[in-house]
Image (cartoon, helix red, strand yellow):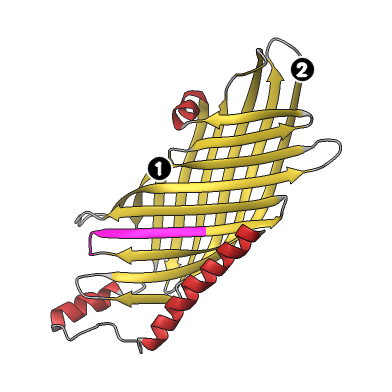
Amino acid sequence: MLIFKRLICGIILITGSYCFAADTASNKVFDKPISKPQAKQCKKCCKNPCKVIIAPYLWSMNMNGFVNVGTRSVRVRQTFSDILENMQGGGMLYVEVDKGKWGVFLNSMYAYLDKIYYINNVPIKPVFEFGMFTGGISYEIFKRCFCQSMSFAVTPYLGARYTLTDVQIKVVHTSIQAGSNQDWIDAIIGTKLNYGMNKNWSLLFAGDIGGRDSNQKSYNMNGYIGYRPDYKCVDLTIYGGYRYMYQKYVNNSESNQYVWKMHMFGPVIGLAFAF
């Protein structure tokens, strides 16, 4: 719970400090006098029209943790190459719709994979079906624009993350097996920091925390750099970065105990199309 309190305090301090900065700036867009063409370009940068973003991406996810089903526990240590080797199917997609300062978003990912482990020379085959679907609403509380298409924005968000795990553990060449199909929902709160360095390059940092109690919690942190080519026919951003997530879920049901503790991390690449 201590780390929850620290993360919440950090989010409050970040968003609060920028709100204060916005107030003390007296709604000024520019730090010093500039030419009329520059002013027109900067004010255009600060507009918030209706926008739809569709972004397919690839999270080169590594998994480190363990899964407990009933009385059987399996250590999970999979690199992205392991996941690709054993993946039977999956996909990742981010969608966002913004209107003015408000926005709604949905981040979806799904994977189905399996792998054989050896515990005391006994072959164990766990089969994983895993999905995460995160949706929410955001509100831009602060945006400061500068010349040369530079801008900085702070956008807190609230939402929920639905996680689905279907784990089947089998002892190879025997009839011994155990399985559990679990799903849960975490309420989340987070903040996005978006820095437009110029008309082509931008930085995005985002983080959120979620959960319900000590048996159900999650942390999620992201950092990306984006490049927007000067294409006239399409509004495209090519981006890359890194994502880390930790999830803990414990179901202490006497008939079917289930524990999911997983660190997920790795680089992210993707394309964002804006309309």
Q: Residue furthest top?
A: 173
Task: Report which residue position mark 2 lands on.
Answer: 176
- The residue mark sitting in front, 1 or 2, is 1
The secondary structure making up most of the magenta span is: strand
User: Quick check: 45 above or below 263?
Assistant: below
- The percent position of residue 82, horizontal first and vertical second, equals 48, 26
Q: Which comes sooner in the sequence, label 1 or label 2?
A: 2
Q: Could one spot residue 275 in this view of the protein?
A: no
Q: Residue at x 21, y 75 (%)?
A: 147
Q: Position of 45 compared to 218: left or right?
A: left
**Is 200 a magenta residue?**
yes
**What is the quadrant of the C terminus in the image?**
bottom left
Q: Give the residue drawn at x 38%, y 59%.
A: 204
Q: Residue at x 20, y 79 (%)?
A: 40
Segment colored magenta: 198-207
Q: Amino acid at mark 1?
A: Pro
Q: Position of residue 38 (x, y in %)?
A: 16, 78
Viewed as shown, does residue 86 lie left or right of 146?
A: right
Residue at the spot of label 1: 267
Q: Position of residue 238 (x, y in %)?
A: 30, 49
Give the number of marks. Answer: 2
Q: Could you say which quadrant of the image residue 27 lies in?
A: bottom left
Residue plotted at (61% across, 58% down)? 3
- Element assignment for label 1: strand
Viewer-side residue, 93 vs 234: 93
Whether residue 248 sits left or right of residue 36 in the image: it is right
